[in-house]
Image (tube, grey):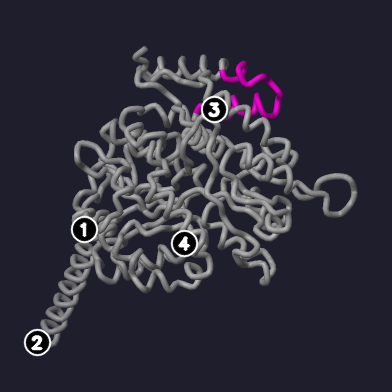
Amino acid sequence: MQSIERVRQLALSMICAILLAGAVAGAAVAQTKVVRVWHTETDPASVKAMAEIVARFAKAHPDIKIEAEALAWGDLEPKIQAALAAGAPPELSHGQPITCTALQQQGLLLPLDDVVKAIGESNVWDQIKKVCRADGKYYGLVHAAGTSLLIYRADWAKQKGLKAPKSWSDLIANAKALTMDTNGDGKPDVYGLTIPGDNLFINILVGELIAANGGQLFDDKNKPLFTDKKMIEVLNFWKELTTALPPGWEGHGYLDTFANMYGQKAAMMFQGYGRGASLIEKYVPKEMQNTDHFDVWMKPIGPSGSKPAVQVDEEPWMLFKGSKNPEAAKEFLKFFYKDENYIEYIKSVPIHFFPITKSLRQSAAYKELPMVKRWGGWLQVQQEALDGDLARPTLVVEYEDLNTKPYLMQVLGSGIIRDMVLETAVEGKKSEEAAAKAQTRAEALIKKAGYAKW
């Protein structure tokens, strides 16, 4: 009997232990907070860097699980809209500044002031503080900044005695001079310029060009200014550029233009970025991987303008209202921006990713990065644009446009601006005719959206 009782007690103890272990495991699972993070940096080096930061964070915060996903730009915006429509947004996502502002004005974002405070507000570059900020709160925080660049073949330009273009006419002259028949078959095999023809980049370029020509896209009553003289000058300039562009340029995407450049099919790249240095080092012969062969110029000024203008690629992190674990997401961002973690991300594309923190940008660790030392001239031109207040986000001419023109994202998505450019530059319509058509379409869009004040 004693042995039976002993067996029964032992079995009871085992059952209790199993139940207790299950309860502990269940509690651990229940306490794990999942944070979904969507970002646009699909470069393998950036994906690897993000994974390393996530792994470090997991060790320091075992109760938080970060699910990071890299998405192409074309996939991100639709996925955000679908997630919002389903009532299941991620905790964090990249987005364009105009996207961030539009979502903030719809009441869909939470402020990131706690993150800025942890970084140190005085430690954040002033230009960064202008993005997606409303009512004194930060509704977006840029992951890194980098401006568009005019990349050119420095060796060919030197051979032909070409200088940095100060005006649009200078650029046209350089582009024509650099359009070359190198194999003697009577046809160009090197074109003077390469430009993306997709919707996003044509919108980016038109925003840049109108700013460099002293113009605006919309007036203070939200009426489009597409028929204005300064926009007509932009369209006429684009028409002239086509004489030095490769056939089929309107079908070329962003990466195609890089391929034209490092494949030695184009001598200048009007919408280049610092990440191009990484592609040059990957694809061109070793002896050409330097600024003696691939360098950058500041972009030129339009006939009615007074200063250059460039686009700044600075997608902010957005924290979504309605997500399950926003506080845990903020903890991740605080960790992400610590110098020892942030540098891993920055050095994945170091000539394109300017750190938003002064502490990292001024650190020896950043300055001593091999690519930073090799391509310092590219960084200097970007720094001049940022410090000189010459850089603006997509379709933004003045930073207040982000808050006063909430329809910019709809204009971007409509394709109106791209149609206007292609009708002029490819189909051969008069600039005035294409502009008038775009004006009518844009007015209708803004009226329908409820923003017309004219």
Vertical placement of residue 73 versus 84, above or below? below
Spatial CA span between label 4 and label 2:
67 Å
Question: Label 2, label 1: how many angstroms apart (C-alpha)?
Answer: 70 Å
Q: Report the span colored magenta.
A: 414-435
Is residue 134 placed above or below 369 in the rendered structure?
above
Q: Which residue is mark 3?
A: 417
Q: Residue at x 67, y 64 (%)?
A: 284
Going by the numbered disc 2, the residue's amino acid type is Gln
Mark 2 lies on a secondary structure that is: helix
Residue that badge 2 annotates: 2
Q: Which residue is mark 1?
A: 120
If you read the primary sequence from the N terminus, does the residue marked by circle 2 or circle 1 appear first? 2
- The CA distance from mark 1 to mark 4 is 25 Å
| Image position, residue 147 (x, y; %) | 46, 49
Q: Residue furthest bottom?
A: 3
- Residue 199's disc number: none
Sequence-earlier tag: 3 or 2: 2
Q: Which residue: 75% across, 46% down? A: 179
Q: Position of residue 245 (x, y in %)?
A: 71, 41
Residue at which label 4 appears: 46
Which is nearer the eye, 428 or 413? 428
Name the N-terminal-most of marks 4 and 2: 2
Instruction: Indicate whether residue 431 is drawn in magenta.
Output: yes
